[in-house]
Image (spheres, rainbow, N blue to C red):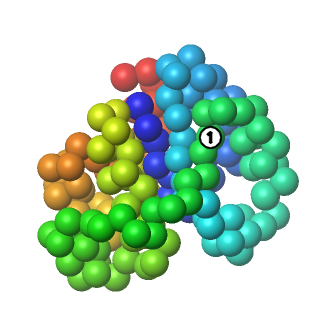
Amino acid sequence: MDIILDTNAFRIFTENDVHKFIDNVVKKCDHIYVPHDINKELGGRLYSSLNLIRERLRKLDRKYHEESGIENIQLPKFIEENLENNKASELDKKVAKLALKRSKKGNKVYLVSDDRCFINTSVLFERLGIFVKSYEEFKKEYLSGQ
């Protein structure tokens, strides 16, 4: 499974059950993907936790990927319009493009975000094989092993 994290989902790396999350990613051979420029936004939101997050990301080794080259990916018109109607940021659009890129590889893709722009368009994303999960929904499902 490919797990696409939006910035608000990065808090998993600051919580007590982070080790269980990391163990699950490794055991299940899952991969975490984020846009390469996500660190700019993370620095503002989670500045005090950045060193801790980086240390925990290192434990994921080759399971964590910062993807570049997604700017030129074209989102389907129905997704793009709905994201714009829901006031998606430029980074949100990059997250959506990254999820689309990964879904075209044939893997199951979870996009983890609490942003309304994703939650409100989750049914549309499912048409593309992308399953939008809120942070709490994903965490409960993933850590319980379902």
Where, by quadrant of the figure, is residue 81 drawn?
bottom left
The answer to whether residue 137 is visible is no
Quadrant (top left/top right/bottom left/bottom right) for the C terminus: top left
Which residue is rendered at x = 44% and y = 21% of the image? 145
Foreground: 120 or 104? Answer: 104
Residue type at the position of mark 1: Tyr
Q: Nearer the viewer, residue 73 or 55?
A: 73
Find residue 24 and report its horizontal and vertical position in percent: 56, 24
Seen in the image, is 87 located left or right of residue 55? left
Give the quarter of the image for residue 95: bottom left
> Would residue 125 be seen by someone viewing this image from the given angle?
yes
Question: How many numbered marks does the figure carry?
Answer: 1
Q: Residue at x 17, y 58 (%)?
A: 124
Q: Quadrant of the N terminus?
A: top left
Classify 110 as above or below 114. above
Above or below for 141 versus 52: above
- Residue 96: give x, y in percent of width and height: 37, 61
Residue 143: percent from left, percent from top? 50, 28
Is disc 1 placed on a helix, strand or loop? Answer: strand
User: Is residue 137 left or right of 41 when viewed as pictured?
Assistant: left
Residue marked by disc 1: 64
Residue drawn at (78%, 49%), measured in percent from left and top?
Answer: 54
Q: For the residue carrying disc 1, how many other residues have a C-alpha within 10 Å: few (<14), some (14-19), or many (20+)?
A: some
Residue most extreme to the top? 27
In the figure, 113 relative to 57: above or below? Answer: below
In percent of the image, x 67 and y 45: which residue is there?
A: 13
Percent position (x, y) of residue 122? 24, 56
Q: Image check: 27 left or right of 71?
A: right
